[in-house]
């Protein structure tokens, strides 16, 4: 667990570098986390994925895998990788303020 | 006492009247002669209950053997269902491409491992109707169950990747997770003069997550022995951020890759195979050319799970990671590769789960709480080539650590180190598998992971 400043606030992060407390998250922090991941500005398509992930997490208690994202978020795999290069499930979870998906072992 | 109104037509009972009240005996049994009663009770049996096991692979066969030995056969009828007659020693597939094992070293009839008197149904499973507590088979037979154990495993699905099964399948593209793939690759390697060998893991989770690493270690050794190692470029391409799923082992195993001159590309998620140009392409358009591609295709649960509506998007069944009870139905338990547990999909894991599951099933049958808890324990010998091996031992919470195993400070096996003894452990394991593990006999390794002998 480490604490550091992001978007003007001092927040706690877990061992994977994801936000430790879900409640600390807001849209401004999402953009700051996205910038750290190399995403300049979050578009509507990014938000479609992020909002889906947050609602899935609140319902199921785990962030969805890429397969589930592709199937249910309305964004296909190809676009997911364009929006969140390298690891969409992992990166989108981090930007959405969620812990790393359990599927990403 | 009282006035007899009339004689009742059974067992010599009488309806009697005392004052204005008529007394009628509640039941004829009240008047049954004790000898008749004892005889009837001794002949009466509680109705037989049905325990059905789906799948006679490693996990299913172990459960059959353990429960057959423990349950009262007058109370529980155990039935096991599997459509295939051959049991494959899957850890042995790894050795086939390098000519160390052949087909005959990894097959035995399943029936050799069933206990005498077990009810075995040889049929394909159509679906589980969980709300009705029954299983429908493809031959129209219906099996009702009181308790169900699902052990239908996982298998590779090359069709999940675009282009995987086009022109080059089993010509320049092979898997080694099936007997057909392993044997076809053995034929190919015997004639191959060298070039670009790419091993690609399509997506996680996969069965035996160390097997792809073992494959490239063995390839390094085998092409060295054949004198063409300088003509073979070995490339390990994985969707993981490193060589393995757990950080510390990933670092150490990554160093082994370096030492053996095996090129590593992490974070590569395959989108498609381009057969004509012989290259794999990731979702973010990174291209890796190959002369021979050894793929670990997407692993998924059995189609039956999807037909039954019980699986997740990879057809794995949501299962309580400690008790092994299905999340959706209290009389369904799941074991081995068929679960969605965040533990490795491997025979050693199924073996540790089998001890836990047996205990919980006995508790369930007696209506007691399920107290036995699986900790995610896995124990894997990693063949590293040149007659050596590496051993790792870990669980949900503790990643593989260095040390000695199973006796602290003594061994004979060394954790996270490359030794000849670890190699002999791996070779000996096949004998243990056929003779002890499958038959449900005790092995000298605890089902829960121990920290004794490990260095932090």
Image (cartoon, rainbow, N blue to C red):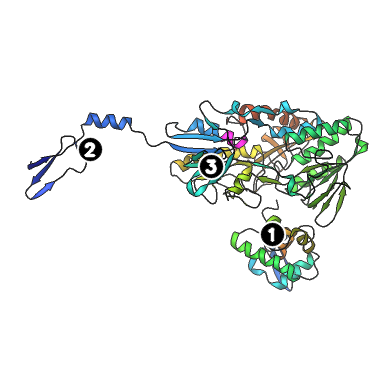
Query: CA gap, disc 1 to disc 3?
Result: 32 Å
Closer mark to the observer between disc 1 and disc 3: 3
The main secondary structure of the magenta stretch is helix
Mark 2 = which residue?
B29
The answer to if B23 sits in the magenta stretch is: no
Q: Position of residue B372 (x, y in %)?
A: 53, 43
Query: Going by the image, does B220 lie left or right of B394?
Result: right
> How far apart are the alpha carbons under marks 3 and 2?
41 Å
Q: Which mark is residue B378?
A: none
Above-or-below relation of A24 to A80: below
Alpha carbon separation for disc pair 1 and 2:
65 Å
Q: Quadrant of residue B406?
A: top right
Q: Quadrant of the N terminus of chain B?
A: top left
Query: What is the crowding at mark 3: few (fewer than 14 residues within 10 Å), some, or many (at least 20)?
Result: some
Quick one: B456 or B229, which is closer to the camera? Answer: B229
Neighbourhood count class around disc 2 (C-alpha, 10 Å): few under 14, some 14–19, many 20 upward? some
How many labels were placed on the picture? 3
User: Which mark, residue B136?
Assistant: 3
Dot 1: element: helix
Q: Mark 1 and mark 3 in contact? Answer it, CB < 8 Å.
A: no
Q: Which residue is located at x 67 percent, y 39 percent?
A: B346
Q: Secondary structure at mark 2?
A: helix
Q: Label 3's element?
A: strand
How far from the left and from the top, in percent, is residue B232? Answer: 90, 38
Marker disc for residue A69: 1
Q: Nearer the viewer, mark 3 or mark 2?
A: 3
* Front in this rendered view, residue A21 or B452: A21
Query: Magenta residues?
Result: B58-63
Front-lying residue, B442 or A61: A61
Indicate left or right for B42 with B97 as reference: left
Count residues near mark 1 (Cα–Cα under 10 Å), then give few for <14, some for 14-19, many for 20+.
Answer: many
């Amino acid at each position: 667990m480490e604490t550091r400043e992001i978007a003007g606030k001092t927040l706690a992060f877990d061992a994977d570098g994801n936000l430790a407390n879900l409640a600390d998250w807001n849209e401004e922090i999402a953009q700051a986390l996205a910038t750290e991941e190399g995403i300049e500005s979050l578009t509507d398509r990014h938000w479609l994925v992020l909002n889906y992930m947050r609602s899935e997490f609140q319902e199921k208690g785990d962030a969805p895998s890429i397969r589930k994202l592709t199937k249910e978020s309305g964004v296909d795999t190809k676009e997911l990788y364009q929006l969140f290069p390298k690891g969409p499930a992992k990166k989108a979870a981090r930007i959405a303020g969620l812990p790393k998906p359990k599927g990403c072992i | 006492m009282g006035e007899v109104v009339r004689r009742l037509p059974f067992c010599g009972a009488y309806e009697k009247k005392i004052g204005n009240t008529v007394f009628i005996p509640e039941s004829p049994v009240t008047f049954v002669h004790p000898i008749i009663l004892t005889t009837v009770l001794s002949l009466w049996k509680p109705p037989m209950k049905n325990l059905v096991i789906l799948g006679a692979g490693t996990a299913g066969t172990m459960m059959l053997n353990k429960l057959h030995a423990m349950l009262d056969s007058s109370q529980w009828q155990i039935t096991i269902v599997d459509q295939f007659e051959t049991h494959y020693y899957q850890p042995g597939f790894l050795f086939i491409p390098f000519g160390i094992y052949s087909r005959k070293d990894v097959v035995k009839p399943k029936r050799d491992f069933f206990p005498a008197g077990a009810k075995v149904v040889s049929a394909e499973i159509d679906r589980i109707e969980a709300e009705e507590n029954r299983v429908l088979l493809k031959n129209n037979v219906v099996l009702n169950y009181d308790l169900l154990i699902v052990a239908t495993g996982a298998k590779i699905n090359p069709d999940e990747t675009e282009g995987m099964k086009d022109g080059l399948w089993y010509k320049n593209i092979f898997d080694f997770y099936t007997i057909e793939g392993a044997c076809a690759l053995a034929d190919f390697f015997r004639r191959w003069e060298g070039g670009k060998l790419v091993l690609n893991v399509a997506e996680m989770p996969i069965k035996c997550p160390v097997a792809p690493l073992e494959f490239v270690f063995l390839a390094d050794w085998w092409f060295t022995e054949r004198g063409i190692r300088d003509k073979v470029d070995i490339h390990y391409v994985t969707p993981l951020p490193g060589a393995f799923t757990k950080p510390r082992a990933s670092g150490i195993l990554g160093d082994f890759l370096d030492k053996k001159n095996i090129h590593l590309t992490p974070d590569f998620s395959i989108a498609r195979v381009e057969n004509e140009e012989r290259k794999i392409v990731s979702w973010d358009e990174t291209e890796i050319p190959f002369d021979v591609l050894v793929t670990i295709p997407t692993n998924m649960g059995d189609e039956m799970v999807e037909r039954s509506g019980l699986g997740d998007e990879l057809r794995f069944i949501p299962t309580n990671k400690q008790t092994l009870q299905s999340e959706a139905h209290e009389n369904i338990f799941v074991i081995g590769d068929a679960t969605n547990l965040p533990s490795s999909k491997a025979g050693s894991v199924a073996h540790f789960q089998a001890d836990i599951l047996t205990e919980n099933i006995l508790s369930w049958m007696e209506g007691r709480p399920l107290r036995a808890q699986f900790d995610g324990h896995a124990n894997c010998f990693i063949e590293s080539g040149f007659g050596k091996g590496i051993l790792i031992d870990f669980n949900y919470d503790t990643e593989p650590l260095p040390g000695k195993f199973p006796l602290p400070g003594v061994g004979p096996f060394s954790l996270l180190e490359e030794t000849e003894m670890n190699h002999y452990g791996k070779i000996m394991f096949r004998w243990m598998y056929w003779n002890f593990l499958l038959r449900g006999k005790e092995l000298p390794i605890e089902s829960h992971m121990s920290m004794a002998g490990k260095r932090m």
